[in-house]
Image (spheres, rainbow, N blue to C red):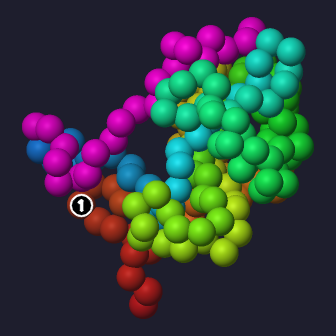
């Protein structure tokens, strides 16, 4: 049940105001508003030999320097354990996140004091897509993998949690 990673593409989601035909597409949907980290988007998965692999920009295998940067985070064993745990649920996972290398970020918006990884999505083969924030967060939390901060959730036209009272 190994994922054919070459066929899996992370969806491109543009800015809310640029949604076509218009931003009203999200009305009636539960939206999770999370922190956007500035780094390199990577995906973590297990190959046919259960070895941890790192992909980037929809490439099956990331460049060696990206792989080494992820290893430097110290999260390799935890990530592998989490990916293996998917089998307990008769599934396979791909964990997506932002790899922030020490120094200036790719867009020069941030300076990172150390190399770190923060997950933001979890693709579940059994579900046939990305889990919602709660499901992905819980799986990462259980395996000590940092997950992006949730600022608010909204449903219909209200926003809960965005402003403190």
Residue at image point 43% right, 67% down? 108
Q: Is residue 9 left or right of residue 93?
A: left
Q: Is residue 65 left or right of residue 155?
A: right
Q: Position of residue 45 (x, y in %)?
A: 71, 28
Residue lying at the far bottom in this picture: please name it.
165
* Picture layout, residue 154 above or below residue 66: below
* Picture layout, residue 144 above or below residue 109: above
Dot 1 crowding, Cα within 10 Å, few <14, some 14–19, many 20+: few
Magenta stretch? 1-21
Q: Where is residue 3 in the image (x, y as percent from the top left)?
A: 67, 14
Residue at image point 71% right, 40% down? 67
Residue nearest the viewer, comparing 63 with 16: 63
State which quadrant residue 101 falls in. bottom right
Residue nearest the viewer, comparing 51 with 83: 51
Residue at image point 38% right, 52% down? 31
Residue 122 visible from this viewpoint: no
Q: Does the magenta stretch include residue 4?
A: yes
Q: Position of residue 157 (x, y in %)?
A: 24, 60
Residue that label 1 marks:
157
Identify the main secondary structure in magenta.
loop
Residue at image point 75% right, 44% down? 68
């Amino acid at each position: 049940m190994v994922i054919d990673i070459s066929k899996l593409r992370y969806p491109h989601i543009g800015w809310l105001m640029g949604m076509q035909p218009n931003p009203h597409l999200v009305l009636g949907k539960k939206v999770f508003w999370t922190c956007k980290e500035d780094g390199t988007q990577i995906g973590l998965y297990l190959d046919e030999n259960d070895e941890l692999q790192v992909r980037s920009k929809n490439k099956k295998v990331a460049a060696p320097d990206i792989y080494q940067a992820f290893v430097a985070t110290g999260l390799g064993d935890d990530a592998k354990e989490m990916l293996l745990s998917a089998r307990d649920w008769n599934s396979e996972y791909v964990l997506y996140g932002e790899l922030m290398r020490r120094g200036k970020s790719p867009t020069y918006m941030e300076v990172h004091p150390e190399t770190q990884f923060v997950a933001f999505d979890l693709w579940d083969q059994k579900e046939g897509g990305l889990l919602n924030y709660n499901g992905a967060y819980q799986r990462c939390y259980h395996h000590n993998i940092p997950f992006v901060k949730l600022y608010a959730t909204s449903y219909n036209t209200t926003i809960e949690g965005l402003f403190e009272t």
